Image (cartoon, grey):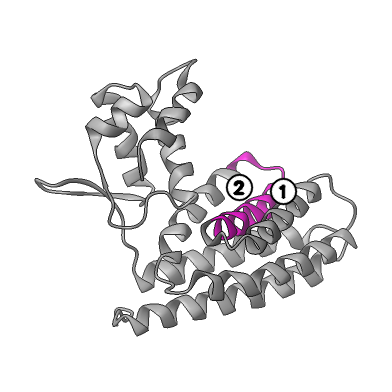
Amino acid sequence: MTTEALAADRALLSRTSTAERVAAILRTRIIEGYFPPGTRLAEDAIGSALGVSRNTLREAFRLLSHERLLTHELNRGMFVRTLSVEDVVDLYQMRRLVECGVIRAVTGPHPGLAALAAAVDDGEEALSSSEWQALGTANIKFHQALVALAGSPRADDLMGGILAELRLVFHVMADPRRFHEPYLARNRQILQQLQRGDGPGAAEALDVYLRDAENQLVQAFAEQGVEAAP
């Protein structure tokens, strides 16, 4: 990734150049797929693009390391983490607990469904233009919007971290279209169930959906010769 996009993000730091705000920008860029697993984050280039000090940037790196998004390698610097099969299993267990729990409670009209519909529309637009990274981003935004139905800032923060890690997992898929495209139709189905007020039905469909996705990702790791720890 070039630093031009980060330079555009510099405006977001105009009020306060805090490590938390820098971390939020980098986390968003990870979610959007700009920093693949194994990417070395160059302090000079990123600090210059965002207009922040080295100390501020290192504190942001430290925050993202605690979120399991970055890892430090001695004498080499900071890198975006490469996740394991165990990470996949744990992430999907958390997703079923959080996402299914949230939408199960939806039994009537909800203003947050507009954001869900917008994410589905974005996914369909990305599919029509063969923008596979954008399709993955639209899918992530759909699931962010699902959890946002709870109206809980803490749930939103939790989900933000989970989905950022998830983007790092998606890179294991050799064919992103084959992975993401079938779930777009399932996103539309879940949206329609929620629009009808059928939260329990949507939660049941989402549970199956998440188990299917987990199995696909675990299989992709196995095909690369990466097995779960005993």
Which numbered tag is attached to residue 155?
Answer: 2
At a point 72% along the width and 48% down the height, the residue shown is 150
Q: Is residue 142 part of the magenta span, yes or no?
A: yes
Element under disc 2: helix
Is 109 placed left or right of 150 in the picture?
A: right
Residue at (83, 44) in percent of width and height: 111
Q: Are marks 2 and 1 in contact (CB under 8 Å)?
A: yes
Residue positioned 29% across, 83% down in the render: 225
Three-letter amino acid code at disc 1?
Ala
Q: Secondary structure at mark 1?
A: loop
Q: Which residues are magenta?
A: 134-155
Q: Residue at x 41, y 65 (%)?
A: 171
How far is the residue under mark 2 from the one under mark 1?
Answer: 8 Å
Q: What is the number of callouts on the image?
A: 2
Quadrant placement of the C terminus: bottom left
Q: Is residue 57 above or below residue 210?
A: above
76 over 5 or under it: above or below: below
